[in-house]
Image: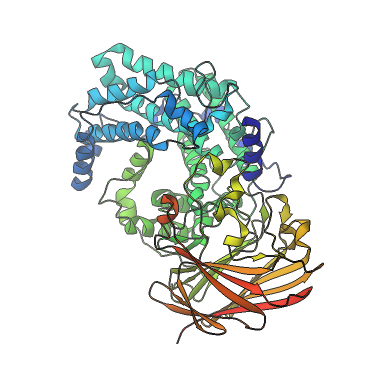
Amino acid sequence: MKKIILIVLLACFSFGAFSYEKRNLLQKEAEETNLAQALVNDFSTLDFPDYTDREFWNNLPETIRKEYIQDAEEYLDYDWPIVKATDYIEIIRSGDRKQEVYAAPRAALVALVMGELAEGKGRFTDQIVNGAWYYSEQTWWGWSAHLTAQKAPHGLPDADEPVIDLGVGEIANVLSWTWFLFKDEFDKIHPLISKRLKDEIMKKAVIPYYERDDFWWQGLDGSRHVNNWNPWTNHNMLTAILILEDDQQQKIKGVQKVVRSLDEFVNVYPDDGGCDEGPSYWGRAGASLYQCLDLLKRATGGKFDVYDNQLIKNMGNYIYKAYIDYPYFINFADADATTGSRPQIIYSYGKDIGDPTMQKFGAFLAEKQDCGKETPGGKIDEQIMQLMHLEEIKNAETENARISDFWLPQTEVAGARDQAGSSEGFFFAAKGGHNAESHNHNDLGTCVLYFNGKPALIDLGRETYTAKTFSSRRYEIWTMQSQYHQLPKINGVDQMQGRNFVASNTNFKADAKKAVFSTDISKAYPEEAAVKKWVRTYQLDRGKQFIVHDDYELEKVLDEPTTINFVTYCKVSEQKPGILLLKGDGFDLEMKYNTKSVTPQIEFNEVTDAGLSRYWPDGITRIVFTVNNPKTKGKNEVVITKKN
């Protein structure tokens, strides 16, 4: 079973093409700036506010200080739980990842730390000690779904083989900051508290990072391409190394290893900077890379700086290219339809790469999310960073970054709207690519369509993650299948997963009057589909209409029907033959089709999954157009306009 899961993970999370350019731009920067000589000895010199910086903490906005203290007070009597053996084993019994078991104590510790920083009276210190001791006593800090990384059988963590996953990295970061902020306070209570905490972080996270090159997310053993795990976990490990490592030579080696590993992430990124995991995953992909770059720059006195590199710029500004209108982003594959998108990081990233649109977009998102009025989210360091930038971002110029159009030629994703700077009218985005992308769905050639900033034709996204999501049965899940996207089912056959199932001849052109995306999706289907060519074209006639056009050629017509599918969040009814009415959130659209060519069927689907219901609580509708009297060659066109 373990081998099957690993094989499927490899298929699902391959990052781009098999070959890629070994840019190694971060290692080159480290060499040019003499990182070994420039690296700081003491983390406290990086000018982050510590516990003793009462001027900083006492001058936070009063609403934020009060909220921090109130949140911490809820945990004054918190009974630190035991992660039971059966909590871990549930992943192999039912597929339940039991994320809440691991999330609850972390939330408690972060709240207590931030509350004590805000109040500064020692009222929460004992409970912070209890939290530190709780984690020190725990066998493993990771998430049960990731236990396949160990050599022992899946289901329970092996205390003799500490492995590093996302969860271990996250806790190592939180505990390192807890140690940094309160080690002196801990020593006043008992000298073994801070010593034990540091020893456990080193033993469970830092030393394994030093000693092993075979964690797949490091990218150092050549076993597979990496994804967002790489910058996400590397940022956490870089943080722990800079805070805890006393041996300067070992610290240098550790940081250099982080740089080598990060290069494996940057190397496989397309030149266009597109994140094939989508905008919500960008928050732990491009955004986490920025956190690493920011920390490296701070830790070298400003010498390590790659913000003038065009790829680094493109990896940043992708986030506003993939933006529709607040709070919606393009959500192909497993990505979420809405995301907070980490405003402070977007602002700071944009500032550092000299992109005023990105910088102002970050300030806009901060304003929409009431930054400065409510406590920020994230780990301790992420909250501190947001607090440090509160006033600057509050006073910054904002921009709702609704650009006219964009084209990512390597990622093969494009989008356009009726009018730049406005949410009125149509917005669409479409994709080509291949069916082994990170968090892949079988969705080559699909699109999303929004009207007045609200969803019309949608990408469903993902259901709540379970063991099945990352197993050999992944594509049994309906949201992963091509028939639940804006795509045809050809001769009764869906698209297939794998790197060989690709789009071809993908193109995009845009001018003041129209934007046109086209791609041949025939190679995304297996041989039994008997398809020679299927060119899907999306055309936005700005301010007028949106056209979906198919031009296809089959080797033969089989018994199973060919259908053309659309998934919508609108309420659908037949207005009259040839016209379907799509009633959305404040708009009505007409979907016009040729009654001689296709016959529609309207299928309503309730949404019961907690993950999907965040975005589609009222259920979704699939429109299934069955091709009438199919021939080996044909064309079909659907035109969507605003109802007058």
Front residue (pair 531, 189): 531
Compared to 305, does 615 lie above or below? below
Q: Residue furthest top?
A: 191
Residue 3 in percent (x, y) is at 65, 31
Picture coordinates of residue 294, whole percent (x, y)? 47, 41
Position of 22 with respect to 97 (left or right) is right
Which residue shows up at 41% across the image and 65% down it?
400
Of residue 213 and residue 61, the one placed in the foreground of this image is 213
Residue 92: image x %, image y %? 52, 32
- The answer, for residue 406, to whether it is visible in the render is no
The quadrant where residue 478 appears: bottom right
On screen, residue 312 above or below 425: above
- Asked where in the image residue 161 lies, by quadrant, the reply is top right
Closer-to-camera residue (183/396)? 183
> Image quadrant for the N terminus?
top right
Residue at screen point 35% across, 32% down = 106
What is the x, y in percent for residue 432? 66, 60
| Residue at left offset 51%, top offset 30% | 38
Q: Is residue 420 left or right of residue 409?
A: left
Q: Indicate left or right for 299 with 130 as reference.
A: right
